[in-house]
Amino acid sequence: MTKTISTTPPPRRFLGEDFQLTTWELLQPFYENLVNRSLENVEALRQFFADRSELESYLSENFAWRYINMTCDTTDKEVKAHFDQFVTDIQPQLAEYDDILNKKTLDSPFLQELLASGEYADAFFITVRNMQKATEIFRNENIALFTEIQNLSSQYQGTVGVMTVEIDGQTKTLQQAGVYLENADRAVREMAYRKVQERRLQDREKLDDIFNQLRDLRHQIALNAGFDNFRDYTFASLKRFDYTPQDCFDFHTAVQQSIVPVLNQLAQERKATLGLDTLRPWDKSVDIKGRPALKPFNGGADLLNKTIACFNRLDPFLGQCLSLMKEMGRLDLESRIGKAPGGYNYPLEETGFPFIFMNASSLMRDVITLLHEGGHAVHSIVTKDLPLNTFRNFPSEVAELASMSMELITMDYWDVYFDNEEELKRAKIQHLEDIISTLPWVATVDKFQHWIYENPTHTVAERTQAWTQIYESFTDSLTDWSGLEAYKASMWHRQLHIFELPFYYIEYGIAQLGAIGVWKNYKENPQKGLQAYLDALALGYTKPMSEIYTTAHIPFDFSQAHIASLMQFVQAELALLKS
């Protein structure tokens, strides 16, 4: 795919090039303009959509930078205050105006004419469908509750962002300490594992308290909107038109039946090859042949340069995407004290080029993270010129298809990270085994969240028991947790999605299945498989989700039969690598 990428953002015709958001009072006249505007024909309605999109794109990017800056340094009080100002003073006003503008749009007598004509008729249909759902569930009394939730999410970030341990006389972030879990010396692995888990336990009560407040606020939001529980509310708010909670339960069952037995096989192989009497949690990441941990890069700059080279070899357009982001300073890759945990690609709606945030610490999983977020970044860039922000805001099941597929279709070029064939094979084996374990973890997190919000008055003890039972049903039965029960019981605290992005997790499972399908297509015909993948990404959200998957030449299917067939394909690829 050869394409020149423009770095020039579209002109601000509605806001004006010089507008800067400092107070709500400066912003409000633009919303009042939209509220009071006469929509006398279909062209006026189109312009109304365009101006609203420009305004929302600006605000999305303004908020994005406040969030990015806060997560890059959770200890900076000025940055935190700048973020809080948006959450407290701007966001509540936006929610109310969004509802007013949605209703104005839906009441327009020219809406049906808009939906029946033009290049983006399907895209407008999807946008309007989403507006209708948002209008159905909007309640004024929930605005303040969402502000409280945002503040509690910031408390979670601040709590986990400063967690450190002392190893070898040095202060390490928990991500940096994770390097030691790949050490060939079992005593070193156990030491690091226990230090990390003990540090997490220090804030167990605080994190449980934060989550109790989040649960209660979310349940109240659901009740206010007329739902029995927050799960049902969230399915509506996430616009999940393509599947139901029952489909999620079926996914859980399929994973338990098709993949957990594979986990047991891999655990048995690990235990036997390592020559262990018992397999312990600190034995799960080390190389089973006792080789040193893979070291695919040396520092964030090296990781980025190698990944750009990897993308270039897959397709020069993909390398160009990351190279431009590098030039624009749109990446913060290395782990450090005070930085929030995790990783993300944050779309920047106005300028079009996203920001990649992660916590690299020289592990192979950091390579996977950058490939993953790089897939998101490409998705952002190939859709940045779609005319409306709603066309660019694709559902998570599509977003994660972009990122997870990139992890797999780049595998032929991972030699940029490794000097010898043995290490390259190790990296591929490690990643494919991680994919096998990803689906059970997705099922664990998703099923746990269903339980949480179906049982909104539960106690901490009941929640702990539920987590433990659910986790044990999706993991191997060989790992010995004796004496480590407290660590297992609070493992979910590390999953930020449960705190900050409730029910955003099943998407990873759906998209992982799709990504395996994209990889299978790529292996069968690289040019055709890659083009279908990029064609699907370029659609943004201008077509229904099922049509986007069809464009990628993969089924939107997470049945047991489909999961089993994909696992057979992955296991066959693993067998070739191990032969």
Image: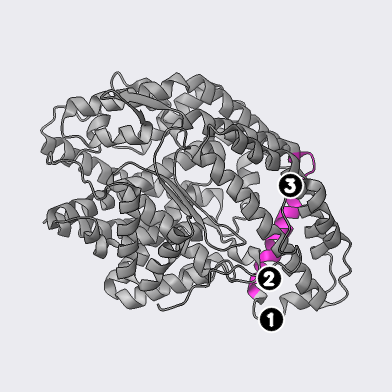
Nearer-the-camera pick, 166 or 486: 166
- Residue sitting at x 44%, y 33%: 494
- Residue sitting at x 54%, y 36%: 499
Q: Please identify the quarter of the rendering in which residue 444 is found.
A: top left
Mark 1 or mark 2: name the one nearer the start of the chain. Answer: 1
Mark 3 or mark 2: name the one nearer the start of the chain. Answer: 3
Q: Which stretch appears magenta?
A: 122-143
The circle drawn on residue 118 is: 1
**Residue 277 position (above or below residue 147):** above
Q: Main secondary structure of the magenta part?
A: helix
The circle drawn on residue 124 is: 2
Residue designated by label 3: 22
* Secondary structure state at the residue bearing disc 2: helix
Task: Left or right? Give the position of 364 relative to 225.
Answer: left
Task: Left or right? Give the position of 469 relative to 92.
Answer: left
Nearer-the-camera pick, 328 or 424: 328
Residue type highlighted by circle 2:
Phe
- In the displayed orientation, state which residue is furthest to the front: 18
| Discs 3/2, front | 3
